Image (tube, rainbow, N blue to C red):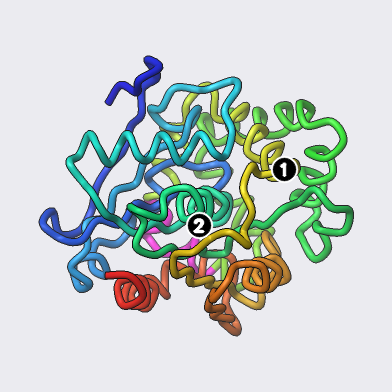
Amino acid sequence: MTLHDGRALAWSEMGDPAGFPVLAFHGTPGSRHQMLIDPAPFLAAGTRCIAPDRPGYGLSTYHRDRTLTGWASDVAELADHLGIGRFAVMGMSGGGPHAAVCAALLPDRVTAAAILSGIGSIGEPGSEAGMMPANRLFVRLARRMPRANVVPFGAIMVLGRRWPDRALAMAAKTAPAPDAAVLARPEVTAAFRRDLVEASATAGRAAAQDFALFARAWGFRLEDITVPVQIWHAEADVNVPVAHATRQAAAIPGAVLHRIPREGHFMALDQMGAVLRELLAAGH
């Protein structure tokens, strides 16, 4: 679709076309492909999963001056375009703050929100504690020299587009055992490979922009969220440590925290059925 300012916003869908709408936001970097791996839980829950590409990712236009609060406006326009009034939201990893902002700014439309392995604010020194070395570097650069992150993220995206199998093998080799096992599944490998091969030319800039947004004031307060929020996080996550979940759960009124033992950053792929049941029970 074309947004009011002329930018393109792309999305894909999975699940029951007549089901309750759930807008699902991908990680950093990423695209809609990350959220659309297995239709079974969406069909079982009777939900229509709508996964948009954020600005600069996939087929959506890069937006140099974008903000987190601007994402809520984009989502509202997409829902209007699809003729949807009320909907739930979920965000995985870097999609977590994007789900939170929709919960905060669209309380009349968002029925409930789920934050899955979601990153919290990284503006404070020490918020990178427990992260794998690469993510610690991205966080520190985001605080001090945010534009410098364009270089490593750009290189990652070039590697992924040209040699996706090599990039996935490298990711699996450096991932903790629970995440490596998830990445080895054929359907997950295929989705992440598609994510890499089809990455836009602006994906590196979009990823650096995400981290810059996470490192400064978000433009809204978690404490002001009034819709039901479920937070799901694995205790073995080294991409985004579980401390990010506990801080967000403490800040969001009434938030329910699910700590998942013995799983990693990609725990949402195994927990999706439970996530959807709780999401619908909380606000539908």
Which range is magenta?
181-190
Q: What kind of secondary structure does the magenta stretch mostly adopt?
A: helix
Quadrant of the image occupied by residue 68? top right
Closer-to-camera residue (67/34):
67
Identity, as a three-letter code, of the amino acid under mark 2? Met
Q: Let me know if residue 189 is in the magenta part.
A: yes
Identity, as a three-letter code, of the amino acid under mark 1? Ala
Q: Let me know if residue 186 is in the magenta part.
A: yes
Residue found 54% across the figure and 80% down from its top:
258
Number of other residues with Cα within 10 Å of mark 1, as a class: few under 14, some 14 to 19, many 20 or more: few
> Is 242 on the left or on the right of 58, as rendered?
right
Number of other residues with Cα within 10 Å of mark 2, as a class: few under 14, some 14 to 19, many 20 or more: many
Closer-to-camera residue (260/18):
18
The quarter in which the C terminus is drawn is bottom left
Q: Percent position (x, y) of residue 33?
A: 38, 46
Q: Could you say which disc has been placed on residue 217 in the image?
A: 1
Residue found 89% across the figure and 53% down from its top:
125
Residue under pointer 2: 92
Q: Percent position (x, y) of residue 16?
A: 15, 59
Q: CA distance from mark 2 to mark 1?
A: 20 Å
Task: Please report whichever mark, 2 or 1, sits nearer to the chain's N-terminal start.
Answer: 2
